Structures are given as C-alpha cells and as structure tokens.
Image: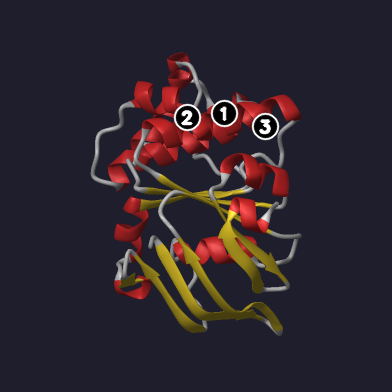
C-alpha cells in the first residue's frame, strides 16, 4: 500500500476540515474526488507533510509519515499545486533548482519531453508562459526530482478543453513510461474515470467511499 490513513482529523480555526478519515491509497493511479470544500486538497497536502494532522496516523509504504524528514520525503513525493508557483527566471532554472533540492542534476530536455513541452521551452521566461504551459512547466519541475509519487492538485482546473486533454494525455503517458504513482485531486468524476484506477470519494471532510473506479464511479 502506498499511503494508509487512519482516523485522520484536522481543524482550522473552528472548522473541522478533515473528520476521522480512513483511506487506503494503493500504488498506481488514485483519484480523490468530491465537491469544493470536501477536504481533498488538504488531504493531499498531508501526504507531502506540508501540514500534519491533529489526530490519527498516516503511513507511507508502511512507515509512519511523521517519522520522515519533510524535505527528504518531498524528494520522493512531489506535489504539483493547483496554482502554478514557478520561481522567477527561465524554465530551465526552475528545473535546476528542483533537481538540486533532490541532490540530482536536471536533465531538462527529458523532463520537458515527459511533461509534453519542446526542449526550446528551457530558455523561456516563466512570466511569458500561458497558464497551460506553466502547468506543464510545474510538472516538469516536479519530474526533475525523479520522484516515486506525484501528487497533483486539480492540474487542469484552469485550462480550456484542448489544454486539459493535452495535460491528461501527458499524465497517461507518464504512467506508461515511468514507474511512478499518481494521486490526483479532481472535482470532475469524468476525469477520475479517465485517469484513475482507484477512487477515494470525499464529502464534508469525510471519506464516503473508496475502491476501484468501476465500483465507485460506475
């Protein structure tokens, strides 16, 4: 099992964002689905230790998540946030920065190809990129760390249909070409059907159902 969550709760202010969550996330492609405010993005952040739960336990590959150094964990588990957050400069400098954090040398051409971008994007100023190009550059930056797991928070929510389809094709190709697991947050059940093998459905901070796509999203 990739991640195991047991009785996980998190409160922000007076709001219970996650309420006694129990869920298994297997190796492969998992989609976390549900309406806005269900706690999906918060759950994803817990898997990368950008926050820790108030109660309960999370395990990664059988080891308690809070026993990992957060920076060491993020070299293996890479989060691509919903809103692109690239550093000033070129695409290549962003890839090099991410690779250095993981103690690696960036293969910019390979990362860009895997993310569906031409190699000439390496020299592009990130401020000149479209929203879709920024999203792909964020994906390339995550891949520069050579992670075992990609956490994707609504990776196509700001894109038009053509750009969405292109990013989804890229993600499907990544799954074929790399031994990498993907945990995808989406409000769109159809996207979960297209990209996921396993689904965790959430509502109001709770997991209401989990299982293979065909069983949860018939």
Picture layout, residue 112 above or below residue 217: above
User: Where, by quadrant of the figure, is residue 106 drawn?
Assistant: top left
SS for callout 1 = helix
x%, y% of residue 117?
50, 21
SS for callout 3 = helix
Name the residue: 65% across, 58% down: 216
Q: How many marks?
A: 3
Disc on res. 164: 3
Name the residue: 51% across, 24% down: 116
User: Where, by quadrant of the figure, is residue 132 drawn?
Assistant: top right
Disc on res. 173: 2
Instruction: Look at the image and tell me whether residue 88 can be seen.
Output: no
Contact? badges 3 and 2 (CB < 8 Å): no
Q: Nearer the viewer, residue 194 or 10?
A: 194
- Classify 10 Å Cα crowding around label 1: few (below 14), some (14-19), many (20 and above): some
x%, y% of residue 139?
49, 37
Name the residue: 44% across, 49% down: 28
Residue, disc 1: 169
Instruction: Look at the image and tell me whether residue 79 can be seen.
Output: yes
Disc on res. 185: none
């Amino acid at each position: 099992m990739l991640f195991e969550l047991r009785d996980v709760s998190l409160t922000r202010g007076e709001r219970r964002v996650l309420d006694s969550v129990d869920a298994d996330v297997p190796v492969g492609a998992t989609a976390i689905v549900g309406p806005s405010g269900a706690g999906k993005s918060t759950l994803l952040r817990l898997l990368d230790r950008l926050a820790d739960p108030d109660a309960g336990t999370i395990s990664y590959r059988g080891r308690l998540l809070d026993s990992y150094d957060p920076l060491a964990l993020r070299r293996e588990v890479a989060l691509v946030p919903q809103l692109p957050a690239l550093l000033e400069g070129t695409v290549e400098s962003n890839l090099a920065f991410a690779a250095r954090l993981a103690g690696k040398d960036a293969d910019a051409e390979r990362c860009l190809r895997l993310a569906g971008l031409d190699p000439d994007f390496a020299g592009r100023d990130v401020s000149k990129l479209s929203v879709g190009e920024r999203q792909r550059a964020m994906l390339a930056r995550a891949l520069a760390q050579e992670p075992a797991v990609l956490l994707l928070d609504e990776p196509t929510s700001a894109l038009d249909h053509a750009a969405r389809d292109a990013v989804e094709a890229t993600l499907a190709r990544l799954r074929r070409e790399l031994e990498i697991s993907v945990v995808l947050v989406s409000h769109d059940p159809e996207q979960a059907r297209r990209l996921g093998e396993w689904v965790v459905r959430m509502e109001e901070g709770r997991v209401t159902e989990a299982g293979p796509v065909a069983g949860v999203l018939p």
